[in-house]
Image (cartoon, helix red, strand yellow):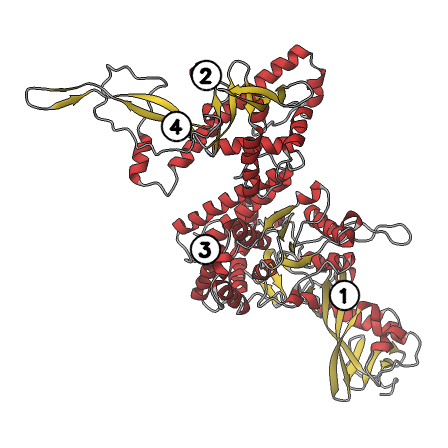
Amino acid sequence: MNSQAANPNQTARWHRDSSGTYETRTGRNGPYDVKLCSHSVTLTRVFSRLLPRETKVEYELKFDNHGSSFTMRVGHEHLADEKAFTLIAPPGFSFSAGPKSFQLFRECLMEDVQNADLVAIVTELGWMILNGVPVFADADGIVRSVPSDPKCEWLDANGTPQPLSLKDINALCSEVPILAGNNRGIADVEVDVSSQLKKYRLRRPSSDQEIRDAVDVFLELLLAGDSNVTYPALFAAISAAIEDPSYVVFLHGPTGNMKTAFGKLLLSLYMTDPKDSDCASFNSTSMGMQARFASTGNVAVLVDDFVQRPNSRGGGEEAKRADDLIRALGNGASRDRCYGDGTLRPSDQPRGLAIITGEQMPDGLDSMRYRTVSLGVDKSTFEDATRTARPNYFDYFQRKAKDGTFSLMTHAFVQWLAPRLATCREQLKSQQLDDQNTPVHKRTLDATNKILEAANVFLHFAVQTGSCSPLEADSHFKRCAETLQHHIQRTYIESIDDSPATAFGVHITSAMLAKKAHVEIDDLNEYLDSSPEIPIENLGYTAVRLEVDGSSEEDSEGTNHSDHSYTTSYRANGTKIGVYRTGINAIDLIPDFALEVANSAAVGGKSSPMPTKKLFGRILRDNNWLASKGADRNTQKVRFGNIAMDVWRIHADRLFEVVIDWGAFDIATYQELSAIEQRLKCEKRREEYSRSLRDRIHTTQWEVMLNSSLTTEDRQRMLIPDPPLGDLPNSVPRTNVLPPDVPSLPGYGDPPKDDLLA
């Protein structure tokens, strides 16, 4: 086209036709067109790519040259100069030789931005805010909520997305200066994640019945193995869909016990048919792991097969990477790094739930372990599901994972969560579990409470979708609470493994409360009359009501009248491990029997065994447990009948203080007190501990009453009130109350003749 030839119909500054792109200028003789390039180029769409650290802008350009048209996407940096654009331009494209052709061409395209469609490209998985409402991003696209019945529970009130602290897609797009004038809003949202995350696609359900069937399979999986593993692990994976957790799950145990297979079932909640290639590995670099977890929000990531090199200093490079990962996820922030000029680089925020498998926990400080929900997997964990010939029960769940049943359930759960996400996240802050009896780190307690509340949220979803009844949901919730309380107890036992005396006290007192052992009281009547600080039940005794025979007479009509009276007796349970000395408030422990009971409890709790007798005697001495001892030895000679034995004579209070919550104790202030003030303060605290112990006994009795395995007849017997301590007066008739059946208990009755302690 002749540049001097005026086009009367061209009123805009820019003009495009099949032969090129032009700028319309006004001269003395009127408007005329100046050719800028060889093709008609139009900017049709603007893409805002939302990366974890920044937002990048891309453009879709439509090229037209004599009827041949095609589109291509270019980055904003390609419009920086003429050379950069020419390198990515299509063959045959060229700029005119006129001055400032590229600058004018770029200005023409930038004016197109105001009318172009804006498309947001999300590069992370998980929850975000779009147009004021929460949406979930998976590799297939955006998962939005479904219309909900206003009468449903836990629906968020209007305006609740703001306190969710989620990335706002609209805000991130508008923060780019070049898009500041675009008021058309976001036309579409795409999800473009890295190749390692492409399989994180939630299968779309086709019917409500399909959702109910999927939830039923998930509830069956809860019962497919040891509930102390399945419940915490599965509901931890569910909790990730609600909120990014501040802990990791570590499945540890000997090889060949299906840790990885179970980990893939957990991963199948967020993808269909997970393979080994979908798992992360500690062979990756720290930067690679950091980049992966920066994009995996609200999903689970399986990091398979942690191996710590033997004889390596500090556990080796793998242990360091595990420590970095666990701390980053626990703290919600990775390590800061600087540019060459000393300024800080943008940091990544690691997200998602890491599920790590390995034969052993990595070496590290306790602070790393407190950020870990450690679950032991051994041969017995999935024994019932794998004992039959294949295909077995475990294979059934693997087939369900392969056809996407579990990811379908998660898709439905995410849709259900969207209109009530703020309420459900607030629910995760509830603290139903406590550490009054087993003091553990606050991070451990927070993790178990979040898992329990995630179970609560999911079971509400299951009930509302008709997948289970409220009674079934309540049963699952109670079982989950029991397993998590067991996890707290086991974590506490593991935390005191480095303190054998403390661990010994926990094992011994737990065994006596469980009626597996007892300490004989030398003078039972004096002990009961003295209002003891230590309840007799904590010493391994059980109160039993026995009938005392009364006289029997027959009246003139032949009716037999009997006088019944009862007495309260205390029976010892289990193994005798020592004698309580009432006069000096000390316990003579028989070393062999006490260590045997403690080691039995340690094996059941999967904690470290006790040291040898000689070594442990020195430990008790160093920890001021011994009330008295012989010369040059940690034991003392004591007579049991005609038999003299070596015993550990320990302070009774030291044995029972280890199971009581110390609470906040100001050591510095205590040390400034005088000796008399310290003694008075200790006496006051012991009274508080004793009161706490009695409360625990009452709580245990109520738990026994609520035991679902008891029959109605058993409960009726337990409701019969016990008589007061001591014998009832013979003059009080009890003809209408039958005493409960008293089963024979271990440790009661005549001991064997060869028992040296008889």
- Residue that label 4 marks: 750
Residue type at tag 1: Val
In 3D space, how far apart are the residues under numbered discs 1 and 4 (Cα atoms)? Answer: 88 Å
Camera-side residue: 613 or 462? Answer: 613
How far, Cα to Cα, is label 4 from label 3? 56 Å
Spatial CA span between label 2 and label 1: 86 Å
Amino acid type assigned to the residue bearing label 3 in the image: Ala
Which badge, 2 or 1, is on the more N-terminal residue?
A: 1
Amino acid residing under circle 4: Asp
Crowd band around label 1 with a 10 angstrom C-alpha radius: few (<14), some (14–19), many (20+): some
Q: Position of residue 732 (x, y in %)?
A: 24, 16
Is any part of residue 746 visible from this angle?
A: yes
Q: Secondary structure at mark 2?
A: loop
Q: Nearer the viewer, residue 37 or 618?
A: 618
Q: CA distance from mark 2 to mark 4?
A: 19 Å
- Tell me the number on the disc at residue 523: 2
Secondary structure found at label 4: loop
Nearest to viewer (mark 4 / mark 3): 4
- The residue sitting at the left extreme is 557
Q: Which residue is mark 3?
A: 462
On the image, the x and y values in percent for residue 611 come to 64, 35
Would you call the spot at circle 2 few (<14 residues within 10 Å), some (14-19), or many (20 or more)? few
Ranked by sequence position, the earlier of labels 1 and 4 is 1
In the displayed structure, 682 sits above or below 374; it is above
Image position, residue 132 (x, y; %): 61, 55
State which tag comes first along the sequence, 2 or 4.
Answer: 2
